[in-house]
Image (cartoon, rainbow, N blue to C red):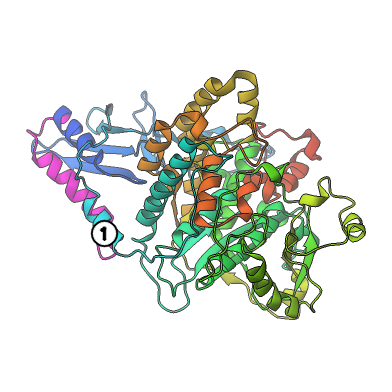
Amino acid sequence: VRTNKSDTQIIFDLLQQSIHDTDGKGENVLKAIASAIGEVKGEYAFIFHHRSSSGAHRVYYGRDCLGRRSLLMHHHSESGNFALASCQPERTMEEGNNNFSPEDRFLLEVLPGKVYCLDVATMNITDCAIKKSTDDVNFNTAMEESSSVSRYPCSNPTVSWPDDNVSSSMAKAALQLHKKLDAAVRRRVSSVPRKMGSKSSLGVLFSGGLDSVVLAALANSHVPPDEPIELINVSFSAKPLNGKPLSACSVENSPDRLAALLSYQELQQRFPSRVWRLIAVDVGFDEVLMHERKICSLISPLDSQMDFNIGAAIWFASRCRGWVVGDDATHELKTSTMLRFAQDLSSVPRLKTTCSKDGCGKHAFHECAFRACRLCCKFYQKPINEFLGGGAKVCIAHNKVKKSNTKNKNRNCPTPNKCISIITEKKLEESHGEMKQPMYTSTVKALLLGIGADEQMAGYGRHRSVYNRGGYDALQAELQMEKTRIWTRNLGRDDRCVSDNGREARFPFLDEEVVEFLESLPITDICDMNRVQGEGDKMILRLVAKIIGVHACSSLVKRAIQFGSRIAKASDVHQFGSSKHATGTAKYKGGK
């Protein structure tokens, strides 16, 4: 929808026209609405009241086929009570009981992929399945045409296919997925109203992992070059902050913060003309408890420990309130073992790419931190070395290190030759105290989320366990099952947590064309479970990252948001006394 148009008005007109073309009978109207809404692509939930010519009042409602927007309902057949809402009313606590009252949990998720009709007079509910449009020209044609002209091209490295370590079919599939994802991001970015000055209109929930980095890099092509793109990263501390910033230890030991800093640095190097604004959202667990009731009401009807942890992480991240990682802040060079990469980096598929420096046609060294040739790598390192006093060895691959020094520096690292030196921020007390950096609250209204990538491309550790038990057939069945239940396991909860902060969640990995394309591929073109973790899982997406030119994230091992942000560690200790005794499926008990 163009920026000067209302999507609500367009959908309203579409439904009105579909009703006008029928004879007005209830069953035919329901089928017409289901057919009309099937032409709409993207995330949506709707409630539509219609009064027929005979005076009958009917309420039509539904969600898209994947359930990407929240819609809850309650229907008590005996009393006739009926309710529709996007979220639960905020829960209350029973006096003298730590458990939330079950009477406050009466709203349940509406099943996606159907249009429902409530006859107000009889309180009967009928439904009709939403049929996908098969027309070449549909409701989204105007939006596609208008958005395609707003593309801001950027140069990508030249990729040579096939590679010795990648099958030709997977290589071809990766190129096609790149195009599908690029179009999916364009559809969700080009319609965002632009802001003036240095304000950003688009943000990415940014763990620094594969999914979020790919989305950020693709968004670079569809956002005006003079507009910042904000990367929001959240980290939790078990200790109360008391209004003070997190300690350096709390931040630097958060795996997602380390990955975010690494990927943020690479995005700056890969797309130097873009202003990338990394927002570090730091939360003490005392603040989590302050908003406990709100978060519990947002994740409801889910109520497990895991759902609370994930919901809290997404709610605080989408609040977008933190401090901006400045380019002029003092940095320290550290070697971190908190980042988990593929166990054997030498077997990672190496795509032949050109040097990342514009105008250089030489081949890039595959292990270079800047994805550059030796000469250009020195060019990139020079200003960093000057800033840090000339002793930094930013790129290990292009700097000869004495064996004795390497042994001492990496004596605690299980794979010392494969540790990656990254630049991390100076202690936050110094950043806030000496630099007096104010707290920053983002003004973005749209956030890109990477939900759906792991469920479709075998990104979780449990997928490897399924494969080990039953091979690719069992894995294929597991992925299909996870896609069908993602609406009840993830999407409603995450949409409510984001929208509560006045922002809209958008899911490029769950774009209809992306989903259909991945469904059409054999499982062996999506992943290769014979490779180690961090390589074979989501392998097709790791190849897409290499096509785009972001390489640091392409061998990172998946960490779920509750573990990468450290919310699970803080929350589990609070609830169970120890992380060892915690179970994610246990019911969350608040008020302790």
The answer to whether any part of residue 196 appears in the image is yes
Quadrant where the C terminus sits is top right
Q: Answer yes or no: is residue 90 visible.
A: no
Residue 132 forms part of the magenta stretch: no
Please, which residue is most extreme toward the front here? 362
Instruction: Kindly identify the residue that appears in the image at 39 percent across and 65 percent down.
Output: 153
Q: Nearer the viewer, residue 87 or 371?
A: 371
Secondary element type, mark 1: loop
Picture layout, residue 334 above or below residue 487? below
- Quick check: 562 above or below 66? below
Q: Quadrant of the N terminus?
A: bottom left
**In screen coordinates, is 401 left or right of 533?**
right
Q: Position of residue 289 (x, y in %)?
A: 68, 52
* Residue in view at x 48 percent, y 68 percent: 443
Identify the residue shown where x is 44% and y is 41%: 172
**Of 313 and 181, which appears nearest the observer?**
181
Q: Is residue 21 magenta?
A: yes
Pointer 1: what residue?
6
Residue 524, horizontal then vertical, whole percent: 52, 30
Which amino acid, mark 1?
Answer: Ser
Q: Is residue 6 left or right of residue 356?
A: left
Q: Horizontal and vertical percent for residue 306?
A: 64, 38
Q: Is residue 185 above or below residue 50?
A: below
- Quick one: 319 or 50, which is closer to the camera? 319
State which region is magenta. 1-26
For image coordinates 28% across by 63% down, the residue present is 149
